Amino acid sequence: MQAYCVKCRSKKEMQNPQQIKMKNGKPATKGVCPDCGTGMYRIGKAE
């Protein structure tokens, strides 16, 4: 799954994607940027 990395300022393929639920109950995907190691989030149901 691709997500935007704010540190690299580009879309990257997320490493170790995990399905999570945010505090407001909405689904999201949490992962790590393969280049810089920054946490990446994508809000919404996984594709």
Image (cartoon, rainbow, N blue to C red):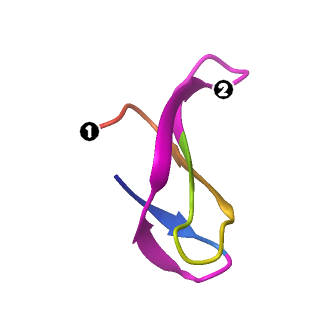
Picture coordinates of residue 36, whole percent (x, y): 64, 76
Q: Mark 1 highlights which residue?
A: 47
Mark 1 and mark 2: span between their CA atoms?
A: 17 Å
Q: Are the residues at dot 1 and dot 2 in contact (C-beta closer than 8 Å)?
A: no
Tell whether 16 sits left or right of 24.
left
Between residue 25 and residue 33, name the one nearer to us: 33
Q: Is residue 16 above or below residue 9?
A: above
Closer-to-camera residue (16/2): 16
If the image is split into quadrants, where does the C terminus sit? top left
Pinpoint residue 17: horizontal percent, then vertical percent.
Answer: 47, 42
Q: Main secondary structure of the magenta part?
A: strand
Q: Which residue is drawn at the image coordinates 66% and 67% (left, top)? A: 37
Give whichever of discs 1 and 2 has the lower sequence position.
2
Q: How far from the left and from the top, in percent, is residue 11? A: 43, 73
Measuring 34% from the left and 35% from the top, which residue is drawn there? Answer: 46
Furthest residue toward top: 25
Quadrant in the rendering for residue 9:
bottom right
Which residue is disc 2 drawn over?
22
Label 1: which secondary element? loop
Who is closer to the viewer here, 25 or 16? 16
Q: Residue at 38% across / 31% down in the picture?
A: 45
Which contiguous range is marked in magenta? Answer: 7-29
Q: Is residue 23 above or below residue 18?
A: above
Query: For the residue carrying disc 2, how many other residues have a C-alpha within 10 Å: few (<14), some (14-19), or many (20+)?
Result: few
Residue 1, horizontal then vertical, whole percent: 34, 52
Q: What residue appears at the point 60 percent right and 83 percent down from the top-left corner? A: 8
Displayed quadrant of residue 13:
bottom left
Relative to 13, 38 lies left or right: right
